Amino acid sequence: MSKVATALKSANETKSLIIGQDVLQQAFIVFKEQFPGKKAIIVADQTTYGIVGETILKQFESNGIKQEPAFVYSDPELYAEYKYVEELVAALEQHQAIPVAVGSGTINDLTKLAAHLTNRPYMCVATAASMDGYTAFGASITANGAKQTFNCPAPQACVADVDILSAAPTEMTAAGYADLFAKITAGADWILADALRVEAIDQTAWSIVQDGLHEALSDPEGTKNGHAQAVTQLTEGLMLGGFAMQWSKSSRPASGAEHQFSHLWNMEHHLKNGEHVSHGFQVSVGTLAITALYDLLLKTDLENLDIQAAFKQWPTEEELKKQSLAIFKGTDFPEIGWQETSAKYINHQELEKQLQTLKHNWQEIKQRLAKQIVPFVEAKSRLAIVGAPTEPEHIGISRERLKETFVRAQYIRRRFTVLDLAVRTGYLDQWLDQLFAKDGIWPIN
């Protein structure tokens, strides 16, 4: 049995997933099996409607599936923003048809949440191997100025035709490869959380994401060139990440500190030349940043960690409140720093226990991390080959801002990551000075 078939059994929302070449023609069969007797409504943007949506509409028509008129977003600046969810909700409230999302990240997330808000399942037809959200529990939507994850079920059925995915713009495939590569550092963060008894690893979710991960990332050149086997492996890896999130009802199996960089930049309304930067491209830079931090962590002798020095720099809860409110003063999200850091705050007694655990078990933890992490030079090479950004400037982020992001990102999520370890051990400033020194990875003149 394939990894996907095995993982599908653990998914409690997605009942049917077909990945392969020339499988688009099976879309109507999947719909009839999963939604017998139901009407359909195609949801797409102008591009995806032209590429695949119209084909699906005609296929459904000729096979006796009744449909409402297709809902096609016309805004060329369409992105995953709540006002677009509301537009689709208003349309869906006029009938009971099952939405069939034809597109990638934006269309899928908008449809996922709108379907949930109108109390119905949905199906998706993937048009690019650009992210892991197809089969994920939850939709990542910007609302009230901040990127938020709304709880909503994954699609009941999904069709991913490798021929269509291989023909997608290369930058979309590169974004998907980067999003899958992020599972490397996300896994390392979970190893840390598990080792320090903050959040135990769920072995089912871990296996779904990690067991075939390195293999799925092994051919960046083939991925870029649209080779069927490489794109199939990439697509399977991305879908597996979604299944793990379904299983655990959390993004923890697929998202760590590298995603916090992306989330923060979205919250800060980051644009490059007036345009949004794709999630995968933001995550590419975030993954390299966190990989560089792990490289330094693995070179640090934590068996001789000075716990008393760590105590001295660790704030009281009141001091943390002042810090966390000050760091986001004047933003759209002034309270989030305190909201999230207070949820993961530990007192000095708990800190001592955690740091002692780190010291006493460092060699074992180090071995686990070294096995998981792809070293920075290798990670950068692979991401460059596939066409993903490898420097902050590639996505319009200055080196000064990247350095600030290492500090600020730790405040926006309660999830324990290597950023929290860096803060708790007191090493963050030292490591940042190394990364941004004249002879560092990102020298700041």
Image (cartoon, rainbow, N blue to C red):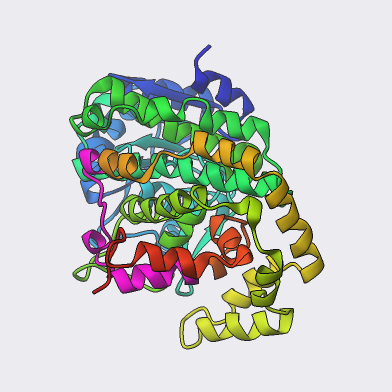
Q: Quadrant of residue 64?
A: top left
> What x and y, as percent, mark residue 415?
61, 57
**Residue 296 in the figure: left or right of residue 56:** right
Report the front residue among 45 and 415.
415
Q: Residue at x 39, y 41 (%)?
A: 375
**Residue 279 in the figure: left or right of residue 328:** left
Question: Which secondary structure type mostly characterizes the magenta part of the structure?
Answer: helix
**Does the magenta run of residues contain 72?**
no
The answer to whether residue 58 is above or below residue 250 is above
Q: Quadrant of residue 39?
A: top left
**Magenta-drawn segment:** 384-408
**Does the magenta run of residues contain 398?**
yes
Q: Is residue 311 visible?
A: yes
The answer to whether residue 186 is above or below residue 55 is below
Among all residues in the image, which is located at the extreme right? 349
Report the front residue among 212 and 81.
212
Among all residues in the image, which is located at the extreme front? 304
> What x and y, as percent, mark residue 443?
27, 66
Report the front residue among 380 and 430.
430
> What x and y, as percent, mark residue 279?
36, 54
Q: Quadrant of the C terminus?
A: bottom left
Q: Residue at x 54, y 60 (%)?
A: 419
Q: Residue at x 28, y 42 (%)?
A: 383
The answer to whether residue 154 is above or below residue 92 is above
The answer to whether residue 30 is above or below residue 128 is above
Report the front residue among 107 and 255.
255
Q: Residue at x 23, y 38 (%)?
A: 386
**Residue 253 in the figure: left or right of residue 101:** right
> What x and y, as percent, mark residue 246?
59, 39
